[in-house]
Image (spheres, coloured by chain):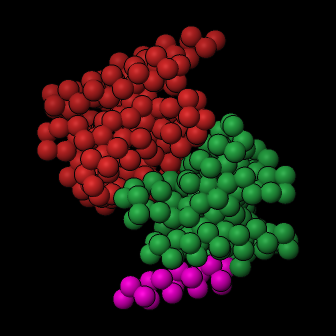
Chain colours: A green, B red
Amino acid sequence: MGQTIDIRHTGDDERWMRAALDEARRAMEADEIPIGAVIVAGGRIIGRGHNLTETLSDVTAHAEMQAITAAASTLGGKYMPDATLYVTVEPCPMCAGAIGWSQIRRVVYGASDEKRGYSRIMSRSPFHPKCTVTSGVLAEECASLMRSFFASKR
Amino acid sequence: MGQTIDIRHTGDDERWMRAALDEARRAMEADEIPIGAVIVAGGRIIGRGHNLTETLSDVTAHAEMQAITAAASTLGGKYMPDATLYVTVEPCPMCAGAIGWSQIRRVVYGASDEKRGYSRIMSRSPFHPKCTVTSGVLAEECASLMRSFFASKR
């Protein structure tokens, strides 16, 4: 991966990550793997989503995909170069590809995904060339939600 | 990429690729980049799709994504380990990721995509470990449709 992943972030980042965590909790309540996402532009949320793969019986129904579709609907256009996507867990390759197509310019995620994360499987960044990536925002809270979910399944 | 891409195929493969080409032509008629896909299981088509990113203003509306969602709906389940996906052009990383999640066991594509294809950006196969890949089926017909579309835009 040729892209730098930054760990510096701001209080605003934590604020929006809390909104993504709220989405993740909604997934948890629906007995779905608890991952949530929000897309922010101009200081407001333009799209939200949480994982709904079980409910919709559809592998494409990840949090980020739903948030991208919702944000495109809000904007009335499919490209969002002024937007930042916040997601509680590192995107998978599918979602990373969608983020790339959408031209989102900043991606902020919480917990890393050592097994399924895009950064383990992609040889170069799937994002827009100008996109920056920040990781580790409220990582412990994001990861803890995932651990609770999987512990409840054992 | 650790995965072998085969170029041997059968008459049945051409038959289903023609169905994918029909989908691609539907995209063309809608002034969309002409890519089509079908998913086949048990000798019949269980999902179809064509690129609708402009019509839906949604970057996630690729042919393969629509076909996967449609096939999951037909099957009443999100995994399709007995299915083969036929697509006129090599999948992008987003679609390749979705194909991986769906557990589809065979991918057959027509034209390669030197710029946006998954095989250029992924360091290992995004598909199920048992998934086989065949490329080059009716490749010239698939590529020619793409060339006609882009020539009409110049």
Q: Residue B8, position in %: x, y? A: 21, 35
Q: Which residue is depicted at the point 43% across and 48% down?
A: B96
Q: Residue B93, position in %: x, y? A: 50, 47
Compared across the picture, whether A76 is left or right of B121 comes to right
Taking B25 as reference, is A4 above or below it?
Answer: below
- Quadrant of the snapshot with the C terminus of chain B: top right
Q: Main SS type for the magenta part?
A: helix
Q: Residue A3, position in %: x, y? A: 69, 57
Task: Decide whether residue B39 is among the magenta residues.
Answer: no
Taking B113 as reference, is A75 above or below it?
Answer: below
- Looking at the rendering, which quadrant does residue B91 occupy? top left
Taking B126 as reference, is B8 above or below it?
Answer: above
Residue A86 in view in this figure: yes
Span shown in magenta? A139-154
Q: Which residue is depicted at the point 80% across and 57% down?
A: A44
Which is more toward the observer, B90 or B58?
B58
* Count of marks overlaid on the render: 0
Residue A33 in view in this figure: no
Taking A6 as reference, is A84 above or below it?
Answer: above
Q: Which residue is depicted at the point 56% across and 54% down?
A: A66
Q: Residue B33, position in %: x, y? A: 51, 25
Which is more toward the observer, A83 or A129?
A83
